[in-house]
Image (tube, rainbow, N blue to C red):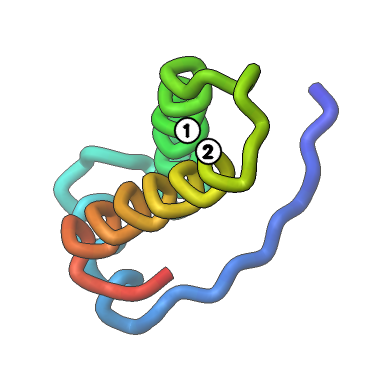
């Protein structure tokens, strides 16, 4: 397996919430939780990417795509209660 090391910083609130889920037995450690979260995000954006017609590469469609990405990101921030 060709793993790459990724360092991230999270706020105290997010780290505390992560630890709570680990303590409840939902995850074995922070790395497992981060990997699962990243996989979920990649799947979400993959679905978004497939739903978007990339054959129309105009300024308007690019702008619309940026707006949709911001909306998805805003919903994610609202769910976890903190900035990334």
Task: Specify the label residue 3 is tagged with.
Answer: none
Please determine whether, in this image, residue 78 is positioned above or below residue 1. Answer: below
Which of the two residues, 67 or 9, is positioned nearer the viewer here?
67
Q: Is residue 43 left or right of residue 14?
A: right
The C terminus lies in which quarter of the figure? bottom left
Residue denoted by label 2:
61
Q: Is residue 17 left or right of residue 43?
A: left
Location of residue 2 (image quadrant): top right
Q: Secondary structure at mark 2?
A: helix
Which of the two residues, 11 or 83, is positioned nearer the viewer here?
83
Q: Residues within 10 Å of mark 2 (few under 14, many from 20)?
A: some
How many numbered marks are there?
Answer: 2
The N terminus lies in which quarter of the figure? top right
Tell me the residue at 23%/54% (across/down): 75
Task: Specify the label residue 45 is tagged with.
Answer: 1
Tell me the residue at 49%/16% (across/down): 50
Please determine whether, in this image, residue 15 is positioned above or below residue 2. Answer: below
Mark with earlier residue (1, 2): 1
Q: Is residue 9 left or right of residue 76?
A: right
Q: Is residue 72 left or right of residue 45?
A: left
Tell me the residue at 15%/48% (across/down): 24
Q: Position of residue 52 (x, y in %)?
A: 47, 23
Which residue sits furthest bottom? 12
Q: Residues within 10 Å of mark 1 (few under 14, many from 20)?
A: some
Inter-mark Cα distance, 1 to 2? 16 Å
Q: Secondary structure at mark 1?
A: helix
Mark 1 touches mark 2? (CB < 8 Å): no
């Amino acid at each position: 397996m060709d793993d790459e090391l990724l360092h991230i910083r999270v706020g105290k609130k997010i780290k505390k919430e992560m630890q709570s889920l680990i303590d409840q037995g939902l995850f074995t450690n922070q790395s497992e939780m981060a990997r699962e979260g990243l996989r979920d995000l990649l799947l979400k954006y993959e679905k978004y990417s497939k739903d978007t017609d990339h054959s129309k590469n105009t300024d308007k469609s690019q702008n619309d795509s940026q707006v949709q990405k911001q909306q998805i990101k805003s919903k994610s921030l609202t769910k976890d209660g903190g900035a990334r």
